[in-house]
Image (cartoon, grey):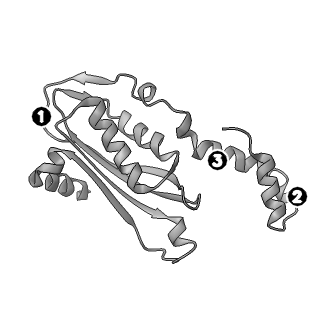
Amino acid sequence: MKDISKNIKDILIKIGENPDREGLRKTPQRVNSALSELLSGYEKDIDKILNNAFFKVDYKEMVIVKDITFYSMCEHHMLPFFGKAHIAYIPNGTIIGLSKIPRLVEVFAKRLQVQERLTVEISKTIYNKIKPKGVGVIMEAQHLCMTSRGIKNDTSVAITSSMLGCFEKDAKIRNEFLSLIKKG
């Protein structure tokens, strides 16, 4: 990401602050650094992240990685939203290294996003890369654009899902996934 420190200094001036005040002198650089980290997903290559960690395995049952913590930025207000992702797939002769699933979530989350698109990007990527029988993704998140401004409802949680392949077509598989992610 390009350095936006000068832009942040301009914002401080426009909101009536003194960017030369002791507490704000390094704020433009800190904000630049924070945004570079929070939006680092633009610089990541999915194929490099996945690093061909695909393995031929005769496993036919559901694989689930649940409670994957993520942090993202709402593209409408540039405020954070954060929560947990639950991801399942049923292999079709190929599995993916388990650590690659949270890495994939992070890549897409570290971009300006809406939760709905984030959910679909993750499911479609897994579906296209390992060609499983099906993929299910459920994301739960709190959005600061709803909790700290606007409606100011600090207890609401947004839940989105994307079901592909057998997860979309077979209610039994979908229900098994939903049941398993509820277990502690």
Query: Which image quadrant for residue 129?
Result: top left
Q: Is residue 3 above or below residue 95?
A: below
Which secondary structure, mark 2?
helix
Instruction: Please name the amino acid that badge 2 sits on.
Output: Glu
Residue 80: give x, y in percent of width and height: 55, 58
Would you call the spot at circle 1 few (<14 residues within 10 Å), some (14-19), or many (20 or more)?
A: some
Q: Is residue 115 visible?
A: yes
Is residue 127 toward the left or the right of residue 48 in the image? left
Q: Secondary structure at mark 3?
A: helix
Residue 60 shows which numbered tag?
1
Give the CA separation, mark 1 to mark 2: 61 Å
**Can you identify the residue that label 2 sits on?**
22
Which percent across, then down, holds residue 180?
20, 53
Residue 10 drawn at (x, y percent): 82, 56
Question: Which residue is at a point 82% across and 54% down the rendered structure image?
Answer: 9
Residue at (31% x, 43% y) in the render: 123
Q: Earlier in the sequence, mark 2 or mark 3?
A: 2
Percent position of residue 146, x then y: 50, 70
Type of amino acid under label 3: Leu
Query: How far is disc 2 from disc 3 in space, using C-alphas?
Result: 22 Å
N-terminal-most mark, 1 or 2 = 2
